[in-house]
Image: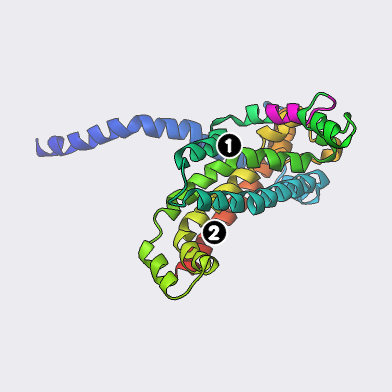
Amino acid sequence: MTSSRAAAPHAGAWLLIGPFLGIFALFTAYPLVRAVMLAFQQTFGPGAAHYVGWANFDFLSRDPMFWKAAKNTGVFTLGSILIQLPLSLALALLLNRPGLRGRAIYRTIFFTPALVGVVFVGMIFMLLFEKRTGLVNQALHAAIGVDLDFAWLETYIMPAMILATLWQYVGFNMVYFLAALQNVSRDLVEAATIDGAGAVGRFFHVTLPSIRPIASFVVLLSIVGSVQFFELPYVLLNGTGGPENRGLSIVMYLYQTGFQAGDLGYASAIAWVLAIVLAACTVAMRFLARGEDA
C-alpha cells in the first residue's frame, strides 16, 4: 500500500513532463543525432546516402566557396559589431541624459525598426538601392549627378547589408545599454566628479566598468546573430550570392548545398563547423567576462 502511494507522485511527475520529453526527443534530440550522422555521409537527396567518414570535413577545409562565405560572414560580423555597438552605446548615452525632453519618443523612434521583419527590411533596402528607380540613385543623381544605373547591390553589397543591419538593430541594442546605464551607481559618478574626473574619465573609469556585463552580453548576441545571417542577403540578392559571391554567407552556402544541391551530408558538416565556432565564441566571451570581473 505504501509503495503504491509512493509511486503515485512519480507517475504524476512523469505524466506532466512526458509531453515535453516527447517533443524534445522528436524535434531536438533526434534532429541533432541525425545531423551528426549526416555529417559523415554523402547524400544524393533525402533517400540516397553512403558513409564517407571525415571526407566532408576534409573537403570543407579545401573548399574555396566555403572560405569565401566565411570571409564574407567575418567581414559582416566585424562591420556590424564595430559600427553598430558604438552607435548603440552613443545613442543610449544621449538618451540617458536627465534633462533631455521627449526621451520616450526618441527611444520609440530608434527602437521601432527592430520590430520590422528581416525580410521586410531586405525588401526596403532592395528598393532603396535599385537601379534607376531606387531612392539612393535618385537622390544622388539630383544632388551630384551620379549615374542612375549605378548598381549598389552589385558593387557595394556588403556595405549595403551592414547599413541595413544598422538601421534595424542599432535601436534594439540601444535598449540594452539604456537599461545598463540606468543602473550605474550615481554615488560612484558623483565621487569621480568630486575627484576631478571629466566626462571622458567618468565614462571609462565608472560607466564602462559598470555596464561591462551587459556590454559582453550584447557583443555575444551580435556575434551569434551576425554569423547566422541569411534572410537579408537572400532577399537582397534574390537567393544568390551576388556577383562573384560577394554577398554569400555561411548559412546561405549551407542552404544552397543542402536544399538546392541536395547534399545534406556536406551541409550538415558545414552546420556543425558553424555550431563549433559559435560555441567557441560563447566560451571565449564567458572567460573574458570572468577575467574582467576578477
**Element type at mark 2:** helix
Query: What mark, if any, has residue 34 been given in the picture?
Result: 1
Q: Residue at x 18, y 34 (%)?
A: 8
Specify the quadrant that holds the C terminus.
bottom left
Q: Amino acid at mark 2?
A: Met
- Residue placed at 29% from the left, 34% from the top? 14
Three-letter code, disc 1: Arg
Q: Do tag 1 and tag 2 residues touch (Cβ < 8 Å)?
A: no
Q: Give the extent of the magenta segment.
A: 123-132
User: How many residues crowd mark 1 within 10 Å: few (<14), some (14–19), many (20+)?
Assistant: few
Instruction: Please name whichever residue, 34 or 83, is drawn nearer the observer in this view of the structure.
Output: 83
For image coordinates 43% across by 49% down, the residue present is: 179
Figure check: 244 above or below 260: below
Residue 127 inside the magenta-drawn segment:
yes
Give percent across and percent down for residue 222. 58, 48
Where is 134 relative to 74, above or below? above
* Residue 50: image location, x then y, percent: 71, 36
> Which of 219 and 133 lies nearest the eye of the viewer?
133
Question: What is the secondary structure assignment of the residue under circle 1?
Answer: helix
Asked which colour scheme the image uses, the reply is rainbow
Predominant SS along the magenta part: helix
Determine which residue is flagged by label 2: 285
Residue 236: quadrant of the picture: top right
Please give the name of the residue rendered at 53% of the width and 64% of the height, measured from the top-left corner.
Answer: 288
Query: On the rendered structure, is 230 left or right of 196?
Result: right
Q: Nearer the viewer, mark 1 or mark 2?
A: 2
